[in-house]
Amino acid sequence: VDTRTQAIEQLYRDRFAGYCDALAAVTGNRESARDAVQEAFARALRKRRRLRREESLAPWVWSIALRAALDAHSRQGTSAAEVGDPGLPDPERDPALAAAIRSLAPRRRQIVFLRYFADFSYSEIAEACQVSEGTVAATLAQAHDALRAALTTEDVEGAVR
Amino acid sequence: MSTFNSVSEALELYVSPFEDEPQAWADVLRRASLAPEEKPARRFPRRRRLAAAALVAAVLVALGLSPVGGALAQGVFDFSAWLTGSPGEPASKEAQRAFEEERSWADFPDGPQLRRLVVTKAAGGTFELFGFRTGDSLCLRLAVEGFPNDGPTTGCAPLDELRRAEAPALAVRLDTSFGRRDVPPTEEGYVPARASASFGIVADGVDAVELKMTEGVAEASVQNNAFLAVTADPPLGLRSQELTAIGDHGERLAVALAEAPFGDYGPKAKPGVAPGPRKIERRVEGGEIGWLARREPRGVSLEAAGLDGLQIPLAGRGEVRFARVIQPDPGGIRRVVVALEYVAPNQDPPMAGTPGEWLCYSVMNKGGGGGGCSPVGRFFERGPVSLGLYTENGGDQYVVMNGLASDDVASIELYLANGERIAVPLKDNVYAIEMARTKFPARLVARDGDGRVIGIEAYNHDPLADPGPRPVAGKQRVVKRVVAANGDEGVLRVGPSTDGTRCWRVSLTGGAGGGGCLPKGFKERLALGVNNSSDAAFLSGTVAPGTTSVDVHFRNGDTVKVATTEGAVLVALTQEQVPEVVIARDPSGAEVGRQRFRRWPQ
């Protein structure tokens, strides 16, 4: 087993749930997210020698996973633009947070998921989403403000505690 | 803890449903093997590889990275003068006596002997740097003559920082100001200092220390394994940004430092991710501290510690019913008061807190310290470990991470950005540990007796730095002043941010206040909050564009209409006025926004 295969397996062990969570935000479906993650790591293994920089592994696998998820949708006749209504894959576990997450724009939501669920660093998110690190920081700051507002509203109204 | 952190925490505490699913690496391998292995990338011919190696070697030589030079260049930093020796010379009897008179049991209990390290004259005064070891810490104390209103100032760092040093110098405190120049204050109320001082320690072999400032470069005096840089008549807001240690072979080595904040705002935060576990492995609720509930006499009493109840948070508003002083780390310099206090029902809730018994703690120092209070039953509502941060001075390079842990917590570990993992001493449910600001982001992880993660507190950037846009210095204007019934004043300032957005800030008598800058692209909306000065409350915040007035409805049925000032609001509240809902209106009187206020828990 070469070192790159070991690195990919380690990434899978460390971030399986995070990738599934982040991808569920894209697919809107727990099963398809899980399947896309499996497929992505398989594709990553096959293409591992194409990876140019070791530190790009996490965003590189993410981009493959995203492609795999969108491919699956396209096979089902769904375009990327029509991808469900993404949110937390299991909203009843934390209804207040799920509702707050739903209030975010999809792009912000994806960056929040990559940051918090897939454990991506700012540079990894920047690479995965093809934006600057500054944009990542600003987007996360905006998402925090939006989440804070949404969570506060929920609390004030007493809808969810 | 700010709301910002509570959002982060809400996200981090979210437990993924996928956590429960078995991973299937075998399935990945099976899927991968369905397709043929790709051809390996073509390798460079041997001749090209040799050429590349030669090029790398040439670059290394050009950069002077051959093993030539002194010990510093080889990464050998000898701090033995501080770890085991006694640098400098004994302090004068007068200096030692002044130190003895000032220190208390809660500061430095083992009677350390001061060592005189560096003396320099500047700005018409004499600056004398002393050093001493106490417990597992080293401390530097800067005494000044010629500045009658400024006493000595002391900063400390853990000795362990020297044992694992990654540079031949260590800053302890930066940009401490002394005196005030005889000039009118700026519009923000600042008066430039007569002198600014930074100090720290150096390893053997360091000949000079340079501090690159926001304007110019300061050369420090280096003697007896310590450095002291004093700038006379510094420009307002002058800050150290880079520190370079220069070795006796001319080596120049960068030393990490954390910039001091200026005014209400810190330097720009560097984005990052706190390392360490991010998932709660076992959820615990309803935490408590058993010995406190049973009133067991752990630690020592306030009297034995030479303290009085006035140094406890909430003192004066609540009756101290039980208090003990705990030293969580036998080798540490920190003492923490843990107290149960009672707030009577007839006290006004916004001023004194919910009636009933409160749990308070405070990291002790002269004149008080960092800490906090919460109703006893709610102290561990958010998790089994609390996290507070305490510094004595904005230029401190070390913060004291402190807090209480419930009986569920068996151990606490601190994960630092540089990969260090530190076992945090925990005694009688109390911890207090010094941490270098240069090592943020950091994550505090609490585990139960089985090693499962039950609590996480994280800071993704240096808490003395600002994650978002900051106000442009010199551009914040006073747009409103209001005076409360007791005479306390609130001052509202508005101005542009470094990102081109709008900032607002309210400053209250006694130093309290609040405010912020809107992130770029953020849709402005009604966002008000209550700030308390020592004895008065003020309602302040920002409103959405188009809002010209707000109606503030109070729980007692009163309503007041307040005109907005440049998109912001500032109102002094009376004791009876507890906001319930605020309605924003445009010039026609139509409602354009509404904000409800959470009721105080009873």
Image (cartoon, rainbow, N blue to C red):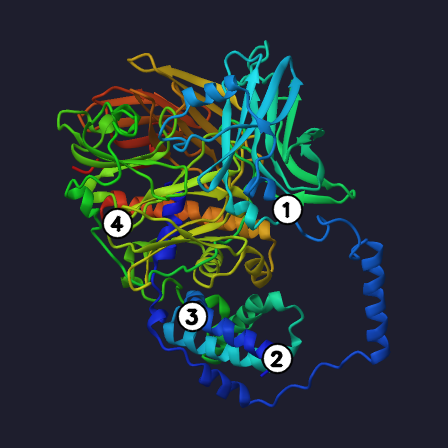
Name the kind of residue labelled 2 in the image. Lys
Q: Is residue B75 visible?
A: yes
Rendered location of residue B169, percent (x, y): 63, 41
Is B360 placed above or below B6 here? Answer: above
Q: Residue at x 56, y 15 (%)?
A: B179
- Secondary structure at badge 3 equals helix
Q: To which residue does mark 3 refer?
A: A20
Q: Are marks 1 and 4 on the same chain?
A: yes
The alpha-carbon separation of the residues under discs 3 and 4 comes to 33 Å
- Secondary structure at badge 2 equals loop
Is A15 placed above or below B541 here? Answer: below
Is B310 placed above or below B77 here? Answer: above
Name the kind of residue labelled 1 in the image. Asp
Sequence-wise, which precedes: disc 1 or disc 4?
1
Numbered mark located on residue B406 in the image: 4
Subunit of label 3: A
**B167 with respect to B47 (left or right):** left
Rendered location of residue B147, percent (x, y): 55, 13
Subunit of label 4: B
Q: To which residue does mark 2 refer?
A: A47
Numbered mark located on residue B78 in the image: 1
Rendered location of residue B413, percent (x, y): 40, 54
Q: Nearer the viewer, mark 3 or mark 1?
A: 1
The alpha-carbon separation of the residues under discs 1 and 4 comes to 41 Å
Numbered mark located on residue B445 in the image: none
Sequence-wise, which precedes: disc 3 or disc 2?
3
Q: Are marks 2 and 4 on the same chain?
A: no
